Amino acid sequence: KERTFCMIKPEGVARGLVGEILTRIEHKGYRIVALKMLRLTREMAEKHYAEHREKPFFRELVEHITSGPVIAMVLEGPGVISGLRKLMGATNPQEAAPGTIRGDYALETGQNIIHGADSLASAEREINLYFRPEEIMG
Ligand code: GTP
Ligand code: MG
């Protein structure tokens, strides 16, 4: 069964959007098979965003994602990797369609509320970064 990794970023938690986001995910039909709240260490954040290490905004990204608690989860369902990305909307919330999470609740790329793995390889890597196998419900 297809699985992906999803995170509600610090601004999503701080703004009280956790319930709203979980509702959209569940109403779509995806199953939450693991979920935890945690605050990322700098080391974890650098691993999470390793693909962006050379980008000019990397420092800002790490500062931001470590700035407060996040919700990390594993979602399961047919086509969930690309399906979650559709629920999220475009990276830049000003370009994200209304009806998407970023389109409805955000205005800035650096404060775009939610993260979703962008490929099967990323999903597997990120799930393993945040969860031990026994934390994931079968
Ligand atoms: P994620 O699901 O968070 O990985 O978003 P994405 O896959 O839609 O975008 P990408 O992986 O390209 O970028 C990762 C994150 O970096 C984005 O979600 C943004 O929060 C942030 N980001 C991307 N581009 C910029 C930028 O130009 N400036 C800033 N400050 N942040 C950026
Ligand atoms: Mg990405």
Image: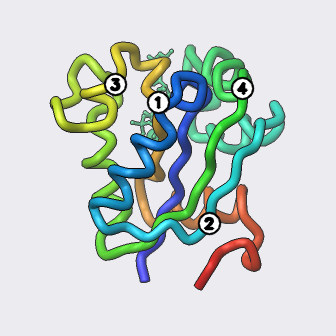
Residue identifier under label 1: 113
The label number, if any, that marks residue 68 in the structure image: 4
Marks 2 & 1, CB-CB < 8 Å contact:
no
Describe residue 87's horizontal placement relative to residue 119 as left or right. left
Residue linked to disc 2: 34
Name the N-terminal-most of marks 3 and 1: 3
Q: Residues within 10 Å of mark 1 (few under 14, many from 20)?
A: many
Is residue 15 or residue 128 the one in the foreground?
15
* Image point (62%, 56%), residue name: 126
The image quadrant that residue 67 belongs to is top right
Dot 2: what SS?
A: strand
Residue visible at 72% across and 57% down? Answer: 129
Q: What is the C-alpha distance between the residues marked 4 and 3?
A: 19 Å
Q: Amino acid at mark 4?
A: Gly
Whether tag 3 and tag 1 are in contact, CB under 8 A, the answer is yes
Whether the residue under disc 2 has CB within 8 Å of ligand 1: no
Label 3, label 1: how far apart the Cα atoms are:
8 Å
Mark 1–mark 4 Cα distance, whole angstroms, equals 12 Å
Q: CA distance from mark 4 to mark 2?
A: 20 Å
Could you tell which of marks 4 and 3 lies nearer the N-terminus?
4
Point out residue 109 in the picture as x, y percentages from the top left corner: 41, 19
- Is 73 left or right of 27, judged from the image as shown? right
Name the amino acid, label 2: Ala
Name the one closer to the observer, 42 or 50: 42
